[in-house]
Image: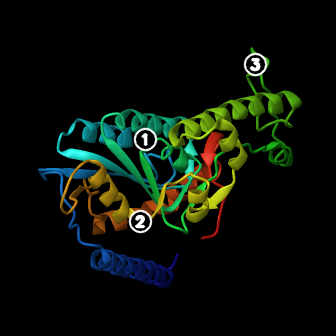
Amino acid sequence: MDKRAAIVLVVIFGGLFAVLFGFMLLAYSAVKSTAAPFSLESESSTGARIGIVEVKGTIGQEQNGVDADRVVKLLKKYEKDEDIKAIVLRVDSPGGAVAPSQEIHDAVARIKKTKKVVVSMGNLAASGGYYVSAPADKIYAEPGTLTGSIGVIFMHFNVRGLLEWAKVDETTFKSGKYKDTLSPFRPVQETDKEEIQGLSDDVYGQFVEAVAKGRNLPEAKVREIAEGRVYTGRQAKELKLVDELGGLDDAVAAAWQMAGQGGEPKVQYPPRERELSLRDLMRGAFQGAFQGAAEGARSAAPSGLMFLAPSLVQ
């Protein structure tokens, strides 16, 4: 490479880096200027309060969704805190993995025996998002909230055609008849369909039982309105899947009153996440190209039984 070409490359890449750095500075300034002030009660607050627990995102995704372990730990913490008179579960989730949804559901069902639990549904509280809400003492939703989607889905992807195109052979050795059920390297067989359908039906039955018990409805009625159908908050109220129409403030006021408290409600949110720094933005800019594709592929192709609402444009 001659000297002139080297200088041109340095100028090009230097310019690209300068543009990227400038963009990061603008993004950081925008984030700092638009961030809402944190005026709610902090962890050091004392006196009677309503504890807020957020279930936002896909349940079972620890990094960018709902970490069930963290939610359950916070619920237990509020349960033991005598100053926390009631709990409001703020749900904005399309659902997610089965077991993590059941863990949160079970924690809510247990805690409501000693403290009132009120759910406030945001934009979307469907499938697993509804599962965790069902056992609450009272459920609030906005008229346009999307909820319900009581059902189970199992997604499977087959890459056999891709392997054949790439001239790659795959051989499986197994010690049990069902060990390679739904293998992505062979066509789906009847035994696969029967096995997975049986699992799906069992988990669906558990979902129906949980809703029937939490909402005090006959199982036959729940099955009639379930089948994976999505409802607006107003429709859900008519079907007795939610109790009242309203937002977070309404849910907090109801929880405060149900706990026997007077005056203006006081709330306590969980600890605020660490503020986004310029270093985070810079690191994300350079790492995102490598990590984003892998994470996106994993999240776009979930496997196993899931409580997930169908994709909806909102």
Q: Nearer the viewer, mark 1 or mark 2?
A: 2
On the image, the x and y values in percent for residue 281 come to 35, 67
- Of callouts 1 and 3, which one flags the residue occurring earlier in the amino acid sequence? 1
Residue at the disc numbered 2: 247
| Residue in the image at 75% along x and 29% along y | 198
Query: Which quarter of the picture shows residue 200?
Result: top right
Q: Which of 69 and 292 is in front in this view?
A: 69
Kind of residue sitting beneath label 1: Ala
Residue at the disc numbered 3: 174
| Residue in the image at 36% along x and 77% along y | 27
On the image, the x and y values in percent for residue 126 come to 57, 53
Tell me the distance, in whole angstroms, between the alpha carbons under discs 1 and 2: 24 Å
Kind of residue sitting beneath label 3: Lys
Residue at the disc numbered 1: 68
- Of callouts 2 and 3, which one flags the residue occurring earlier in the amino acid sequence? 3
Vertical placement of residue 83 versus 21, above or below: above
* Secondary structure beneath label 1: helix
